[in-house]
Amino acid sequence: MVEIRRVSLADQAAAALLERIRAGEWPLGARLPGETTLGPQLGVGRSTVREAIRQLAGQGVLEARQGAGVFVTALDTGEEWDAVLRRAGIASVIEARIAIEAEAAAHAAERRTPAALRAIRRALAERHDRRGSTEEYVDADMRFHRAIVAAADNPVLLELFDAFVPRLRQAMIDMLCMGRHVSDDADHAAHADLTEAIAARDAEAARRLSRAHLVSLADALR
C-alpha cells in the first residue's frame, strides 16, 4: 500500500516563495511584500504566510526584522552538512581537510599554549604506540590532528574538523588494510616535524608540513 504524504498549506506556500526567490524575483537583500500582498498571490491566509516565512527563516533563506519587514538572506536552502559529506568522495574530503588543517596548523604555531603543546605531544606518542592495531592507530591519528586544530583556538575550525572524522575514519582503515600508505618511519617523522614546527612557533613551516602530509595522503588514496 502506498502511503500518501499530506503537504500542509504552509509547506506549499514556503515552496512557492522559495521558487520565486530562486527565479530571481527577489534578489539577495530584498524586502518581501507584506502578508496582505503575499496571501492573495499564494492563495492562502496571513497566518499561513507567516508560517511559510518562519519555515524559510529557519532554513536561513529569510530574516524577519522587527519593524522593518522580511528580507532575503540566501537564494536557496543549504544542504545538510552530513549529507554533503556522505556524498563527497574521500579525495574531496581530504582536499577540504588541507584547506582547514594547513591553516589551523599555522594558527596553532602562533597561538598554542603550553598545555595545548603537551596535548599534541601526548597524541603524537600515542599515535606511535598504537601502530599494532589499525583501528586504534587511525583513532590515535585523528586525535593527533584534532589536538592541532584545537590548539589553533578557533571553534569553527574545530567543528569543521569534527564533521570530517566519521566520513574519513573508515576510508583510512581501508587504506591501511590495503597497504596504501607511506612507510611508518617516514610518516611518524612527518608528524614529529609538524609538532616541532608548532613548538617553535614557526607558522609557515607548520602550514607547509601539514599541507605536504595531507597531499601525500590524498595521493595514497588515489
Image: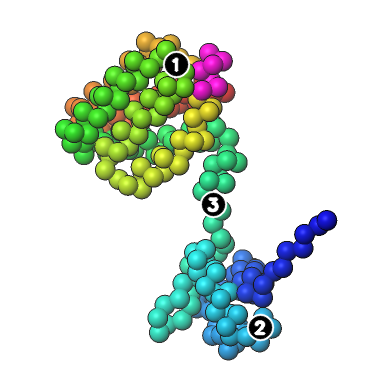
Instruction: Check disc 2 and report its element: helix, strand or loop.
Output: loop
* Residue 111 drawn at (x, y percent): 21, 39
Task: Please say whether residue 22 is one of the residues in the magenta stretch.
Answer: no
Distance of label 1 from label 3 (alpha carbons): 33 Å
Query: Which disc number belongs to residue 44?
Result: 2
Task: Please say whether residue 178 is one of the residues in the magenta stretch.
Answer: yes
Please, what is the three-letter code of the amino acid marked with disc 3? Glu
Lower position in the chain sequence, tag 2 or tag 1? 2
Total numbered labels? 3
Q: Is residue 195 left or right of residue 39?
A: left
Q: Taking the image as drawn, is residue 16 in sight?
A: no
Please, what is the three-letter code of the amino acid marked with disc 2? Val
Judging by the rendered image, the residue that carries numbered circle 1 is 133
Q: Please tell me which residue is depicted at 22% across the width and 34% down the height of the picture.
A: 116
Judging by the rendered image, the residue that carries numbered circle 3 is 80
Q: Which residues are magenta?
A: 173-179
